[in-house]
Amino acid sequence: MAAIETVSRITLRPHDRQSLFDVRSIRLPRERPPLDEYDPIQYREPKAPIKLWMAYFNFLRSLFGAGVLGIPLAISQAGIILGPIIAICIALLIIHMQLTLSLSLDKALKDPTVLTKRYGVITIGIFVPAVLSIIFGIFGYWSFGAMEENILRSLPFDDELALLAIGLYLISIAFAYPIQCYPATQLIVEVIKNYDVDFTPSDETLKTIEAFARPVFVLASFLMCYIVPYQAAVVSFMGNFCTSLMVLVFPATMELCLLYPKDYGRYNVYLIKDVIIIVLGLLAWLKNLPLWTWDCVNEKCVPTKTKLTENAISLTTCNMLCASMHLWPLPTGPVSLSTTAAPVRSDLFQLQIVAFPSPPVHDLIRDTFDIFREDLHKMEKEVFGFEEWRSVLVRITINKNGSGDPRMLLNTDESYILSVHPMGNSITVDINANSFCGARHGLETLLQLVWFDTYVGCLFMMEAASVVDAPRFRYRGLLLDTARNYFPVNELLRTIDGMAACKLNTFHWHATEFQAFPLLLSSVPQLAQYGAYSSEAVYTTNDVRLVVQRARLRGIRVLLEVDVPSHVGSAWDWQSHQGFGKLIHCDDKQPWNAYCADPPCGELNPRNSHVFTILESVYREILQLTGVDDIFHMGGDYISSKCCLEQFNSSDPAEIWLEFTRKALRRLEIANGKLPELTLLWSSHLSERIKLDLKAYVSNIGLQVRSVGWAHKYITGVRTVISHEDAWDLNSGFGAWQEVSDGAPYNSWQRVYEYRPWARGTGCIQGGEAIVWSSTLSSGGLDSRVWPRAAAIAERLWSDRPEGATRPVHARLDIQRSRLVSRGIRASPLWSMWCTHNPYTCD
């Protein structure tokens, strides 16, 4: 494809003749003369020359033809109509290509590791475009190659001028348009066939040449353009250079095509085709014009219809720069945000660690900053060219007297101070914290000050900001049950990413249940071998390490729970076949609802010492895998009164439960070297006696409370984590598998957000936790079930403002949901898109 312009004069020396002629006045006759003693120059005669408007018309065809296909080839052709200054055009084209078309290559040159990453330039930025080019090859041939091919095929193949045009065409095709390999190989065959009429190759020879030339041409073009990244600049230069040189011959050769009506039709056919392409391109351009623009009126974004004479402002940009604050969770300290923004790019964010208390903290900050830039890169979608990107220097200072342990601990200081201010043509960000986790929270807030403007096609960042922040509660968790139904590891990682975006700090992994034991531990692999649904539905130790590492980089602890003594099943039956006695009682009892809440039932035998030997191994490996040793969850839910009566002739299940809990606590103490600072148990009527009967351990014991109706006096002075199911159970309202009626009501985000149980003064509350049981939930539905409602509890636990679910909160949560979606989390919508566009009128 090439735009056409008039070219004044060129000097050629065909057939050893020295002549000077004007290509505007030289024409060939409509019919080719006999081949004997044929001299092309003798048969050229003046005809109506190609006008300059035709060149611009062809340029428009190129421009809007690119709009049809979504392939910005017009940019690489922009200099063709400027023939007298071809060299300048080529330089400008290469610069423009670097700023617009090759953003990923530009990043690769600045960060060479991008080339070799699993989803880096070679695999995604190079291979995928190659595949797309092949897919669009037919369209590319139709809209860009038809005219050039027809022109070149109309040439006399024994004319050096014609061969020069063909050679330039083939070179430019090889470098710039490999999708047109078919017409290129056809031209090669025709040149060989017609170059010397006295020695015409046989049809068999031509077929052999074609069969060999086509794959060689395709492979060479593919390797040249896509496989070798560092040749991209050369490829771009050669493609533009050769295509630009074609401007010297195409004004003349185009007319040759026009003068062969029998084979190719009159020129108006091409003009009609070009008109169609221009119209389609204009339609595609108009289709992509924004329909709405938003204006900030009285600190609210109000939509109006877009006018072509005005610059449109996207809703995202208006939301961020209008006077309202859209951080989530809302900071607890003073906040000041500017109403101006600057264009930025993910690869232009640089890190400077000013101070740190320990090498592990330093290393983790660097790894976390890499994830921060990955999150920024996910926000960059269809990035357009922008000439004034600002570089951003992020300076992180962690108090040297602060925590040298990068883990999320019970006593971790998560506070931070964030400051953003412009410095000339760059932006400087200062994050000050007393721990790694605090600094990570600062990066998370910084990420919320950056957004992608779909109208401009660029990331923007607030030029100035000041945030002082610290959480209200130390424990802010999300429980996920992966035993009743299995969830792939990638969904767990995505859940952790969502938690980090909302500053939740505890991933409570409820890994085992009556139904399954999917945790494949190295110390006791038999538990998973006997208890998993299948060999694929397990979590290996490498899977656990992957989740733990991702969580640690996100400032999150992984609380891995193996629920005992109840909620156990066939996984614990393996040793009974090896002479170790009965490890579990009441397994698979019928009717099951007389023994447990879900089938199949089962409870560990507190009188079998082998049970606690296994538990000690399980506890030790969990502590090693998670690296969390200051807090531990033992499960400890209720046990069956009926089972106790049948197996131990005891009418008091609390005695059996206390007996088991004492022995399990001792084994946990041995496995950890000491009892964790906080050992959590599920609250039930059995835990009423822990202050008296577990007096030696009560200072290290905490309760996770699910029922709001549980008597307050029993938890007074005992540390408590709130998980009230009537407000924070995210699976409530979807029905239970055994229920005929609708069951418990749905917990809307408003109910989740407005629930403040600590206002009643119930005990020593450490924090709270949203819970997700998976009886009626499985892979594929996790994101929409959890988000954005888990974000509501995240702000409640971080900020705990007395404000209810007001309209501004609704609007802020909608913006936070859009952030989650931009990170690949399939969060449910809060309302209709109309309400998103009109948040303060959607009552």
Image (cartoon, rainbow, N blue to C red):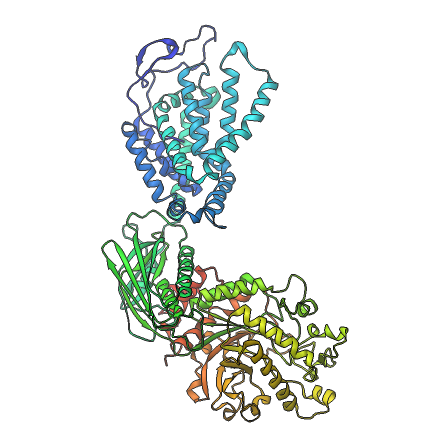
Residue in the picture at 51% in, 38% down? 134
Name the foreground residue: 823 vs 317. Answer: 823
Q: Is residue 785 visible?
A: yes
Seen in the picture, residue 365 relative to 121 is either above or below; the reply is below
Q: Position of residue 187 (x, y in %)?
A: 49, 23
Q: Image quadrant of residue 561? A: bottom right
Residue 501 in the image: above or below residue 6: below
Q: Which residue lies furthest to the top in this view?
A: 37
Q: Is residue 647 above or below residue 149?
A: below
Q: Position of residue 652 (x, y in %)?
A: 66, 92
306 vs 235, left or right, is left
Task: Give the quadrant of residue 488.
Answer: bottom right
Quarter occupied by the C terminus: bottom left
Q: Which residue is drawn at 48% across and 62% down?
A: 825
Query: What is the total number of numbered labels drawn onto the structure image?
Result: 0
Residue under the point 46% across and 89% down: 762
User: Which residue in the rendered view is the most extreme toward the left?
Assistant: 424
Dividing the image into 4 quarters, which one contains the N terminus? top left
Closer to us: 180 or 556 = 556
- Closer to us: 666 or 88: 666
Q: Does residue 488 appear in the picture of this structure?
A: no
Q: Closer to the camera, 559 or 355?
A: 355
Where residue 771 sits: x, y (%)? 53, 75
